[in-house]
Image (cartoon, rainbow, N blue to C red):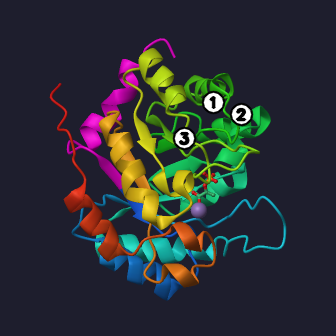
Amino acid sequence: MENSKALRTWLDDFHLNHPLVIAGPCSAETEVQVLEIAHELKNSDVTVFRAGIWKPRTRPGGFEGVGAIGLKWMQRAKEETGLLLATEVATPAHVRLAMEHDIDVLWIGARTAVNPFAVQEIAEVLRGTDKIVLLKNPVNPDLSLWLGGLERLYNADIKKLGVIHRGFSTYEKTKYRNNPEWQITIDLQNRFPDLPLLCDPSHIAGRRDMIQDVSQHALDLNYDGLIIETHCNPDNAWSDAAQQVTPTVLKQMFLDLKVRQKTD
Ligand code: PEP
Ligand code: MN
């Protein structure tokens, strides 16, 4: 990653307004749910609609995602709202399906980011792509492992790269679901000042009442964007119910957040 300046280009070309906002449900649940949320988010600060199609659960028995059928619902959401689409990919098969269904932004989740073999396999099927690829931090606070994953993607000639900070697991209980350890991303910014950096306040906070503060903290640290879990009926969400906000709350939050305009 000798030329991290090149990494900045896609963000500047694609999204001049700061910050880039990705929002949508933790998981696609039904076609109606996907379309309802997407319609609520159109004509807002949101540029990209997110939904998890394959859900990597820490323990078995939970909802593991609707699978490929959900990609069709997302495509319909894009046709109807003009929002771009983002989903998590964890295997080469996921990548192929996401590409076939016009997903614009592919992100690699925290549980996949810990595994160099998995990241390398994904990098190989993405080789040379002009899709936007975002790598979440690994669940553990290991900056080298995170950078290693990024280098695997960069070396596969994927140039529209960025990272998402979603906090780190700890055995000790903290007020966060995943401890932000902001210093790690400050180190990352110092080393790669042009690497697009997004914050996922939803998975850091784990509670909807903390999303705004975490988002503000990220913006104060000059983050380039936010990815925020958004659901029309958060309490009944099939995954991550406690941390999702309604589209109405999200829109109000963007009225209240203080966004520092980038001058360079
Ligand atoms: C998600 O974005 O819903 C998700 C599973 O995130 P993470 O990989 O950060 O746990
Ligand atoms: Mn989630």
Q: Is residue 143 left or right of residue 256?
A: right
* Residues rendered magenta in the picture: 1-21
Observer-nearest of 264 and 98:
264
**Looking at the image, is 77 positioned above or below residue 217?**
below
The residue that appears at 30% across and 76% down in the rendered structure is 248
The residue that appears at 55% across and 48% down in the rendered structure is 107
Does the beta carbon at disc 3 come under 8 Å from ligand 1? no
Neighbor class of circle 3 (other Cα within 10 Å; few <14, some 14-19, many 20+) is many
- Percent of width and height locating residue 65: 68, 71
Q: Determine whether the residue tagged by mark 3 lies in a helix, strand or loop.
A: loop
- Percent of width and height locating residue 95: 63, 52
Mark nearer the N terminus (1 vs 2): 2
Q: Quadrant of residue 14?
A: top left
Mark nearer the N terminus (1 vs 3): 1
Mark nearer the N terminus (3 vs 2): 2
Q: Quadrant of residue 85?
A: bottom left
Neighbor class of circle 2 (other Cα within 10 Å; few <14, some 14-19, many 20+) is many
- Percent of width and height locating residue 133: 51, 42
Q: Which residue is mark 1?
A: 146
Q: Which residue is mark 3?
A: 180
Determine the CA span between mark 3 and mark 2. 26 Å
What amino acid type is highlighted by mark number 3? Pro
Is 8 contained in the magenta span? yes
Q: Which residue is mark 2?
A: 120
